[in-house]
């Protein structure tokens, strides 16, 4: 059993084996032989009860494949709407260049 599989078993998470991962996550040219455990993206957004349960266990397991493919993803809970920004230039704009125009939570 690999180290990643052992960690996954202890934590109760799902691990993406390197051979099943998208090619951009594990480029062959890096020569890296160890890959940290990573949750498999959800095919669609989770329902509210499953979302709350998963958030408690591991928030990264809530992310869908869209979170890894789109520069901005809208989501949240019924009482709170959020935008997750993943594109480096957009992150710079929100956090540094134009931060006064964006509301941010205290978390």
Image (cartoon, rainbow, N blue to C red):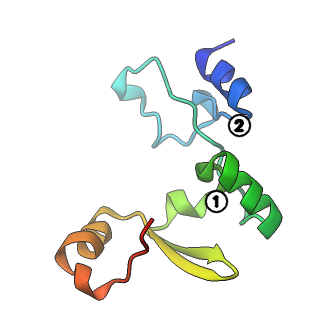
Image-quadrant location for residue 93: bottom left
Judged left or right of residue 79, residue 71 is left
Identify the mark at residue 64; answer none if there is no mark: 1
Give me the disc on residue 14.
Answer: 2
Residue 26 point in image, percent of width and height: 46, 34
- Most distant residue in the front direction: 106
Could you tell me which residue is drawn at 69 percent across and 31 percent down?
A: 11
Which quadrant of the figure contains the N terminus? top right
Q: Position of residue 35 (x, y in %)?
A: 50, 26
Occupied quadrant, residue 5: top right
Per the image, label 2 sits on a secondary structure element best described as loop
- Location of residue 87 with respect to 3 vertically, above or below: below
Q: Nearer the viewer, residue 97 or 52?
A: 52
Residue situated furthest left in the rendering: 97
In the image, taking residue 80 as reference, residue 33 lies left or right, namely left
For image coordinates 53% across by 77% down, the residue present is 82
What is the secondary structure assignment of the residue under circle 1? loop
Is 82 positioned to the left or the right of 31 in the image?
A: right
Name the residue at the bottom extreme.
101
Pointer 2 or 1: first along the chain: 2
How many residues crowd mark 2 within 10 Å: few (<14), some (14–19), many (20+)? some
Q: Are marks 2 and 1 in contact (CB under 8 Å)?
A: no
Q: Position of residue 70 (x, y in %)?
A: 49, 67
């Amino acid at each position: 059993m690999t180290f990643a599989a052992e960690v996954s078993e202890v934590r109760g998470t799902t691990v993406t084996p390197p051979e099943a991962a998208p090619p951009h996550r594990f480029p062959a040219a890096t020569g890296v032989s160890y890959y940290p455990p990573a949750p498999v993206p959800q095919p669609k957004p989770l329902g509210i009860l499953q979302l709350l349960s998963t958030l408690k266990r591991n928030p990264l397991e809530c992310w869908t494949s869209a979170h890894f493919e789109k520069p901005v993803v809208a989501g949240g809970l019924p009482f709170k709407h959020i935008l997750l920004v993943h594109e480096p230039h957009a992150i710079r704009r929100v956090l540094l260049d134009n931060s006064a125009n964006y509301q941010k939570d205290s978390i």
